[in-house]
Amino acid sequence: MKKDMNKIGIVILLVFVSLTSYAQEVDEQEKEKALRSSTNLTWDGNKALSEDNFVAAEVDYRKAISKSPDNSVAPYNLGNAYYANETYNEAFGRFKEAGEASTSKEEKHKAYHNMGNVFMKRKDYAKAVEGYKEALRNDPGDEETRYNLALAKELLKKDEEDKKQNEDDKDKDKENKDENKDKDKKDEEDNEDKKDKGDEGDKGDEGDKNEEKKDGEGDKKQKPESGDNQQEQPQPRPNELSKQQVENLLRAMQNAEKKVQDKIDAKKVKGVKIKNEKDW
């Protein structure tokens, strides 16, 4: 009984192995069939592209890619077509797809080399360097890739220097702006001081004016008093001024006072604060 069970187990195992092998064989056959169909579509795309029919070529390449993920030629050729049309984002995606699908070092080298070219067009020199390095890992002897790598490194170095210079220029601009702000603040403070001093000077002139007015009023009070008899004209006494002399003196004082007032007014006009032009 035990021997019979062992025989049954062996038979089941053999059947399972046979079915697995058959399934794998069928799967391989399907893959080969899909790859052949994909390759034929790739040829159609190449023919359309050679006839400058980009639209038809794009359709054929896309069909080829959808038929078989093992076809690395279709995405590579489609990437080249996009690159020629300066559609760099699409081109990069197809080159990346080709590099991942490729099984040979030669195909990988071409795909990564072209990815580096796309990054150069974008002026993304750091990524271009990495793309060319990956290409050289698959084909260290390619002189064109070596040249492109050296160029990408040089452009990356220059780009970094330019960025650093721009940062330094920004820092200098900020320092200059801060210095100008400090200068403006100092000018405002100086102008305020000048204004305060000017106001004090004006007040002093007004004080002189008030003193002169008081003196004038005092002189007016010193006018000789008339006698008890209003009808009689008082006679001038020694060291006393006549009425006409007093009036002449008052007129002279008023003229002098007017001249002083004019001078004060002139000073006020000159003392008006004027905004100076800044010497940057």
Image (cartoon, helix red, strand yellow):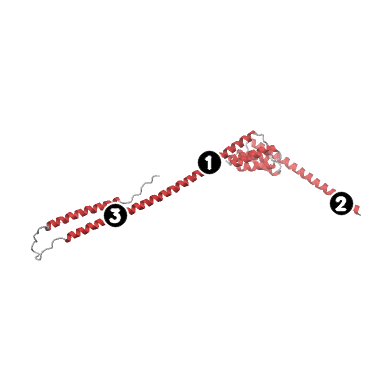
Query: Are circles 2 and 1 on residues that touch, CB within 8 Å?
Result: no
Q: Quick check: can you spot residue 160?
A: yes
User: Residue type at mark 2?
Assistant: Gly
* Residues packed near mark 1 inside 10 Å, few (<14), some (14 to 19) or many (20 plus): few
User: Which tag is nearer the camera, tag 3 or tag 2?
Assistant: 3
Figure quadrant of the C terminus: top left
Tag 1 secondary structure:
helix
Q: In this figure, what is the number of numbered marks?
A: 3
Q: Pointer 1: what residue? A: 162
Q: Is residue 178 above or below residue 233?
A: above
Image position, residue 102 (x, y; %): 70, 40
User: Is 171 or 201 nearer to us in this picture?
Assistant: 201
**Residue type indicated by callout 1:** Asp
Give the labeled residue for mark 3. 202
> Crowding at label 3, few (<14), some or many (≥20) Cα neighbours within 10 Å?
some
Q: Name the residue under label 2.
A: 9
Residue at the front extreme, as displayed: 239
Residue under the image location 43 percent in, 47 percent down: 180
Q: Distance between the residues labelled 2 and 1?
A: 75 Å
Is any atom of residue 86 visible in this view? no
Q: Which residue is drawn at 22% across and 58% down?
A: 213
Q: Position of residue 202 (x, y in %)?
A: 29, 54
Earlier sequence position, callout 3 versus callout 1: 1
Question: Between disc 2 and disc 1, whose residue precedes?
Answer: 2
Q: Residue at x 20, y 53 (%)?
A: 256
Q: Which amino acid does label 3 sit on?
A: Asp
Task: Give SS at disc 3.
Answer: helix
Q: Where is residue 105 in the image (x, y as percent from the top left)?
A: 70, 38
